[in-house]
Image (tube, rainbow, N blue to C red):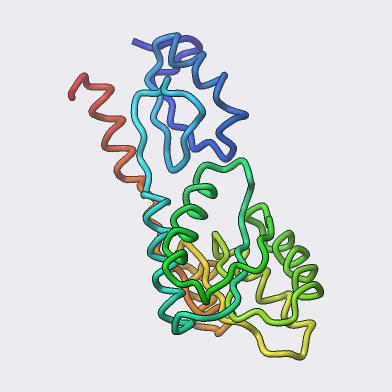
Amino acid sequence: GAGREGVDLLVVSPNEGHALTSVIEKAYNAGIPVILLDRKIESDKYTAYVGADNYQLGYEAGLYVAGILKSEGNVVEMHGLATSTADMERHQGFSNALSKYPDIKIVAEGYGAFRTEDAQKEMAKIINDIEHIDLVFAFNDPMALGVSRAYEKYSGKRPYIVGVDAIPDEHGGVSYIQNNVINASLIYPTGGADVIDLAQRILTGQQ
């Protein structure tokens, strides 16, 4: 039967875990099943979580970067939000992978709010501060695009730019790569179909 306000089940992708924790706890405590997609909250009061392993994604990115740089060089990380769980996990995986390569240094970290314009501004500041940058790892493709745009204003050599998501539409990472705007992107599975399947099982009382 329907819970409060006629909601049978909630699917939430919490951009910032902290902000939504209490609301989600309330729904869960009221007996409404809650599926978290892609991001977690600061509590275990939810029914299920569907998402890719962000630590592993960051780790794979680190190994890829080490290969591209032949184990030495200066790297910039362009984060999304300091409060995003996906962000923290990607950073952890990335820096752990790179810890095996002492000649690769993370020389700066920016916060581009997962948006192109913000990442462009952040990267412009970093370019002014740091002379030598070999590679930028942006935590999503819109920020990778912003990083690339920041370099359009400078005549120097653009670093190798890696994004995350690799969505294959005209505004996604795959087209940025085809158009030589960025160099590479890690595929991030979105999990939408899995969530619908899981919701169906919860609503029909299956395991």
Q: Which residue ends up furthest to the front in the rendered image?
A: 102
Q: Nearer the viewer, residue 92 or 22?
A: 92
Viewer-nearest residue: 66 or 144: 66
Q: Disc count in the image? A: 0
Which residue is at 26% across, 37% downward? 197
Q: Quadrant of the C terminus?
A: top left
Question: Relative to residue 34, is residue 27 depicted above or below?
Answer: above
Rendered view: 161 above or below 198: below
Q: Residue at x 80, y 68 (%)?
A: 125
Compared with 38, 132 (above or below) is below
Vertical position of residue 33 compared to residue 101: above or below: above
Name the spot of residue 199 as percent of width and height, x first.
31, 30
In the rendered structure, the answer to whether residue 1 lies left or right of residue 54 reads left
Task: Where is residue 79? Give x, y as percent.
Answer: 61, 56
Q: Residue 176 is drawn in which quadrant?
A: bottom right
Location of residue 179 (image quadrant): bottom right
Query: Residue 59 appears at what percent x and percent y?
Result: 40, 60
Q: Is residue 67 left or right of residue 127?
A: left
Tell me which residue sits at (68%, 57%) in the image: 112
Comparing 139 with 149, the one in front is 139
| The N terminus: image quadrant | top left
- Residue occupying image coordinates x 42% and y 20%: 45
Q: Quadrant of residue 17?
A: top right
Would residue 68 be found to the left or right of residue 107 on screen? left
